[in-house]
């Protein structure tokens, strides 16, 4: 192999590839996207040759290369890989390649590039890890050299960037608000920078969540798309950028990283900053292809839950702050009767907590409301065969609390005084080691004393003026690191403990927090019409078993909309299912329906929590078809839902995505949730046979030609189950 091709490193997995050439002074990215195959020496040389762009008029007099560490030293006028200064000096970083480590694997592998700038006293290690899923994780560690000048280096930003081709011309990212998280927004990628910055101390309800750039019109099932997710639970930055001169031979860039506050990261000699992992993924099969890569990545984690996800009842919308033992005992009885496996006591159990304006921080059981502690309820819950879980919000504090009165210096904020409260609360300074230790000990005592299996860990307010000490040093980064350490330490003491990431609903949903939690609460909204959209887009990153999906009361707590049972129950089926209502007030027929629903969830749980998520691209946005298909194509469950009326009377044939075209399937309508209200005189011809569980159809008809689906009234849903069947003799036909 020639010297030039020996310096080209290739990582390949699951149909995707990264190619980096160790050029001097900084390596360049030759390719990221579709797998180019097992390249020969000639092909590698050709890739390097064609990676050299033209020299433009009125431009730098060398070809502009897109490097792994793009800065103005390369003639790069876009967002740089890093910004910072040393007491106002060394503002033009010139890191150069010092060493590299290349460890390819049969599926993926890792490439680490060691860069250095002796003048600024900086070393950087940029690590590219391609997982078997095809997701590329990139992390940078920037270190101040021991022989550097004693003055601290002020790090302003580290941004991870990868190239995009010209055909990547449309951006998809997300926004939202309380009870309407992950609302998609699309726009063309023009010249300049499309940047989304988060300054909330957590990803927030309007989190960009995942930024995707693809060929115009890309959908769930088709189109080439590139995406990035920043695995960090604090301030973030996402960007897609395109300059007229391009990015080397590429057209634009996609990237992200932690958003750093001024003066927050100051590196003394020997100190380091490690960026969050930016997860990059490419797909030529639309957004479902991206989702499949991310789901495979997440499910491969050592910390991923392996056992069945227990059906939950959470007490919040059942009792709110009215913690009466007899009422809660009756609620637990009803929960066990309908098939609940985990009972969670929500807000209101701790000292002084009769409303949301007092008590946060005092993490001991209220002796007035609970004179015998939580033991009578916990023992009763366990006697019914259920696990016990508890709501906490450790990172927050009410000023009306013993903790705030005894330790006012633990409240995060400027030395001159804290700013306005949000939801009557302030933030506890977890960078203060005494406050951190207090929380760990308090939570440890609770989990140990009551044998708690699950903590619903909330985080309701945003972080504003995240500074502490007499000098008002910014600590937004340190706050996130401390939260991670707190969760890690608690789970080290209690390895079986599960934690949910809840943040005023879905305000902290990211792969950083999910390294130490077991599920997320997607939204405080249980209205199934809203939830269909929220869960649809949450599922772009997370598999269903990590997303809390609860059945609320027929009248939604957040919208006052009345929902029909089939849509309420079908919506909550596709996730980590639970109940969020007062079962003691449910009539017998509703309890029977919930009992059938929990039984159906347990039956289908292996498929729902182990299959491939699929979504159909439909022209009519008032209808949805989504489902989960077994990876071997042997089984599938689809939800056909109508959210609103539309001009169309007939939908035509709708393709059922993800099936095996050569297989034969038994098609069955699951009626345990009740039949929907139909908007038709009679259904399509196949429907009656599917209701009687005697319909068998070829996969090619279902997946390629499509199935004419019944017309539903608004706010209704139908469940279709498919199981692979043996082909029938010709005389037997399609009915069994």
Image (spheres, rainbow, N blue to C red):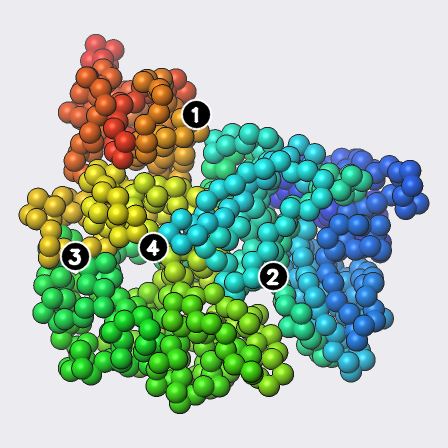
Question: Of 143 and 361, which appears nearest the observer?
Answer: 361
Res 672 label: none
Cα–Cα gap, marks 4 and 3: 16 Å
- Measured along the vertical axis of the image, is residue 645 above or below residue 684? below
Q: Is residue 62 left or right of residue 188?
A: right
Indicate the quadrant containing the C terminus: top left, top right, bottom left or bottom right: top left
- Closer mark to the observer between disc 4 and disc 2: 4
Mark 1 element type = loop
The residue positioned 23% from the left and 64% from the top of the image is 320
Cα–Cα gap, marks 2 and 1: 37 Å
Mark 3 element type = loop
Give the residue pinned by disc 4: 524
Q: Quadrant of residue 448?
A: bottom left
Q: Is residue 452 visible?
A: no
Q: Which badge, 2 or 3, comes first in the chain's sequence?
A: 2
Give the residue pinned by disc 1: 619
The residue positioned 20% from the left and 83% from the top of the image is 367
Cα–Cα gap, marks 4 and 1: 29 Å
- Dot 2: few (<14), some (14–19), or many (≥20) neighbours within 10 Å? many
Is mark 2 in CB contact (under 8 Å) with mark 3? no
Question: Of 561 and 185, which appears nearest the observer?
Answer: 561
The residue positioned 47% from the left and 72% from the top of the image is 420
Question: Of 81 and 9, which appears nearest the observer?
Answer: 81
Give the residue pinned by disc 3: 582
Q: Position of residue 681 (x, y in %)?
A: 19, 17
The residue positioned 32% from the left and 18% from the top of the image is 649
Is mark 4 in CB contact (under 8 Å) with mark 1? no
Give the residue pinned by disc 2: 258
Mark 2 element type = strand
Q: Which badge, 2 or 1, comes first in the chain's sequence?
A: 2
């Amino acid at each position: 192999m020639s010297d030039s091709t020996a310096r080209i490193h290739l990582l390949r997995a699951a149909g995707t590839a990264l190619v980096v050439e160790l050029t001097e002074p900084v390596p360049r990215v030759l390719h990221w996207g579709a797998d180019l195959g097992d390249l020969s020496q000639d092909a590698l040389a050709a890739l390097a040759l064609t990676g050299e762009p033209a020299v433009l008029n009125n431009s730098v007099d060398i070809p502009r290369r897109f490097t792994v560490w793009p800065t103005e030293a390369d003639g790069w006028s876009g967002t740089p890989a890093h910004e910072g200064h040393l007491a106002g000096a060394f503002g033009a970083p010139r890191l150069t390649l010092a060493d590299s480590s290349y460890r390819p694997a049969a599926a993926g592998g890792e490439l680490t590039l060691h860069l250095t700038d002796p003048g600024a006293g900086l070393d950087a290690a940029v690590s590219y890890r391609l997982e078997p899923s095809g997701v590329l994780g990139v992390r940078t560690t920037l270190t101040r050299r021991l022989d550097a000048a004693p003055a601290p280096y002020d790090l302003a930003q580290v941004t991870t960037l990868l190239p995009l081709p010209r055909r990547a011309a449309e951006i998809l990212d997300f926004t939202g608000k309380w009870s309407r998280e992950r609302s998609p927004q699309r726009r063309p990628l023009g010249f300049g920078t499309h940047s989304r910055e988060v300054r909330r101390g957590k990803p927030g309800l309007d989190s960009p969540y995942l930024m995707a750039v693809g060929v115009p019109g890309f959908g769930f099932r088709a189109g080439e798309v590139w995406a990035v997710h920043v695995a960090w639970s604090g301030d973030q930055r996402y960007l897609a950028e395109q300059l007229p001169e391009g990015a080397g031979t590429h057209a634009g860039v996609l990237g992200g990283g932690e958003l750093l506050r001024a003066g927050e990261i100051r590196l003394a000699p020997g100190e380091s900053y490690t960026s969050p992992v930016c997860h990059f993924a490419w797909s030529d099969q639309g957004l479902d292809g991206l989702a499949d890569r991310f789901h495979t990545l997440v499910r491969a984690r050592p910390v991923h839950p392996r056992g069945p996800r227990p059906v939950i009842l959470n007490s919040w919308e059942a009792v709110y702050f009215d913690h009466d033992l007899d009422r809660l005992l009756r609620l637990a009885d009803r929960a066990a009767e309908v098939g609940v496996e985990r009972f969670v006591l929500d807000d209101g159990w701790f000292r002084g907590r009769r409303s949301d304006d007092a008590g946060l921080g005092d993490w001991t059981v209220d002796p007035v409301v609970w004179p015998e502690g939580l033991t009578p309820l916990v023992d009763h819950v366990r006697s019914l065969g259920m696990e016990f879980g508890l709501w906490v919000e450790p990172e927050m504090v009410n000023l009306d609390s013993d903790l705030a009165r005894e330790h006012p210096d633990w409240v995060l904020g400027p030395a001159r005084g804290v700013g306005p409260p949000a939801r009557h609360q302030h933030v506890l300074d977890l960078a203060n080691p005494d406050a951190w230790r207090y929380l760990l000990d308090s939570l440890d005592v609770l989990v140990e004393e009551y044998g708690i299996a699950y903590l619903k860990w909330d985080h309701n307010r945003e972080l504003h003026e995240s500074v502490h000490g007499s000098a008002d040093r910014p600590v937004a980064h340190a706050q996130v690191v401390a939260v991670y350490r707190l969760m890690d330490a608690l789970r080290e003491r209690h390895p079986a403990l599960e934690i949910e990431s809840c943040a005023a609903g879905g305000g902290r949903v990211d792969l950083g927090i999910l390294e130490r939690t077991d599920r997320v609460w997607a939204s405080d909204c249980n209205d199934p019409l809203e939830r269909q959209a929220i869960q649809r887009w949450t599922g772009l990153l997370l598999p269903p078993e990590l997303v809390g999906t609860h059945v609320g009361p027929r009248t939604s707590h957040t919208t006052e909309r009345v929902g029909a049972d089939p849509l309420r129950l079908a919506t909550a089926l596709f996730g980590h299912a639970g109940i969020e209502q007062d079962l003691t007030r449910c009539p017998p027929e509703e309890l029977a329906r919930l009992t059938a629903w929990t039984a159906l969830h347990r039956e289908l749980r292996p498929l729902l929590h182990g299959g491939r998520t699929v979504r159909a691209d439909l022209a009519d946005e008032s209808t949805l078809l989504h489902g989960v298909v077994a990876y071997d194509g042997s089984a599938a469950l689809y939800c056909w839902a109508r959210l609103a009326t539309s001009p169309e009377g007939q939908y035509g044939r709708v393709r059922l995505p993800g099936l095996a075209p050569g297989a034969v399937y038994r098609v069955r309508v699951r009626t345990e949730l009740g039949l929907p209200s139909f908007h038709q005189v009679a259904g399509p011809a196949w429907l009656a046979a599917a209701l009687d569980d005697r319909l068998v159809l070829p996969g090619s008809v279902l997946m390629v030609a499509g199935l004419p689906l019944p017309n539903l009234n608004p706010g209704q849903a139908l469940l279709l189950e498919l199981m692979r069947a043996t082909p029938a003799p010709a005389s037997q036909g399609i009915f069994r």
